[in-house]
Image (cartoon, rainbow, N blue to C red):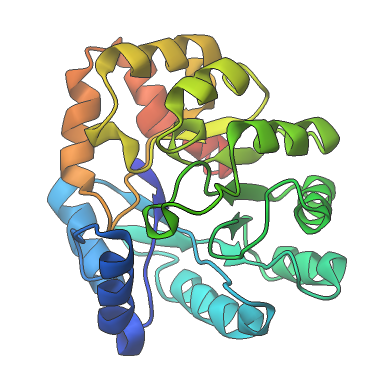
Amino acid sequence: MIIDFHTHVFPDKIAEKTIAFLAEKAEIPPFSNGTVTGLLARLEEANADIAVNLPVVTNPKQFESVNRFAAEINATLATAPRRILSFAGIHPKCEQIDEKMAWIKANGFLGVKLHPDYQETFIDDEGYMRILAAARRLDLIVVTHAGVDGGYRGLPVRCTPERARRLIDAVPHSKLVLAHYGANEMLEESLATLAGLDVYFDTAYILRFITPELFRAILEKHGEDRVLFASDSPWSSIEKDLSILRSFGLPKETENKILCENAARLLNLR
């Protein structure tokens, strides 16, 4: 089994426009069309089994619509041979965060996605601390974008390793996932500041750019049990990223943990 822990899809009626806008903003060509059918096709192409969809609530008013679509994905694909498992989204400026997180849990979601840049909030903000505390209490996974986002280049990075460390120290949660191997385009800082903490790293987007030496250095310090394979589809190719990871020459047991076993344990699939 192969699990891609970090992907994005959008409703068909807005996918084309949304992907075009984001691609232009971040100057990143897409590798898929951003739809459910497009992602399923990329899973088929890569012979991967499960993709975790990570929706972003960019303002508090989107909470209901974003999570309605996420729930539809889970209901529609619950028994599909190639499956998309969607998390929920929440914004740090939402009112009644505890109640909303309880609703997320009650509706069968396994976790939530945060994106400090899109949500215009630093990761060590009180709102994120409340979300993380609720997630810990409810046994929910939290995935956050970390490091530089190409669409916000030149602006302050809202989830630097230092700020992420402050959040982790304030609200420890072993089911926190820092995307992009701890900090996109700040990987040396991730190695120095975050590697080895009781959180997960995913490999979303960074595999085409990281050196094998740096990948292995972070892996060795952080631990093979807390790294999750992820592509960031449609912003990277699942098939290509699998090929790159396999080219690093990791022990087969380590590779299997990254590709499947760690994610399956975190998602309670075994």
Answer left or right for 103 relative to 235: right
* Residue at image point 66% right, 67% down: 90
Q: Position of residue 233 (x, y in %)?
A: 30, 55
Q: Does residue 29 sit above or below 253 in this rendering?
A: below
Q: Is residue 35 visible?
A: no
Q: Position of residue 209 (x, y in %)?
A: 25, 32
Q: Position of residue 205 (x, y in %)?
A: 32, 43
Question: Could you say which is closer to the camera, residue 81 or residue 191?
Answer: 191
Q: Position of residue 55 (x, y in %)?
A: 50, 66
Answer left or right for 107 relative to 254: right
* Residue at image point 58% right, 57% down: 113
Location of residue 178 (image quadrant): top right
* Residue at image point 52% right, 25% down: 190
Q: How many marks?
A: 0
Residue furthest front in the image: 154
Location of residue 248 (image quadrant): top left
Question: Could you say which is closer to the camera, residue 48 or residue 173?
Answer: 173
* Residue at image point 55% right, 78% down: 66
Answer left or right for 198 relative to 13: right
Residue furthest bottom in the image: 13
Q: Does residue 186 sit above or below 81 in this rendering?
A: above
Name the image quarter holding the N terminus.
top left
Answer left or right for 209 relative to 94: left
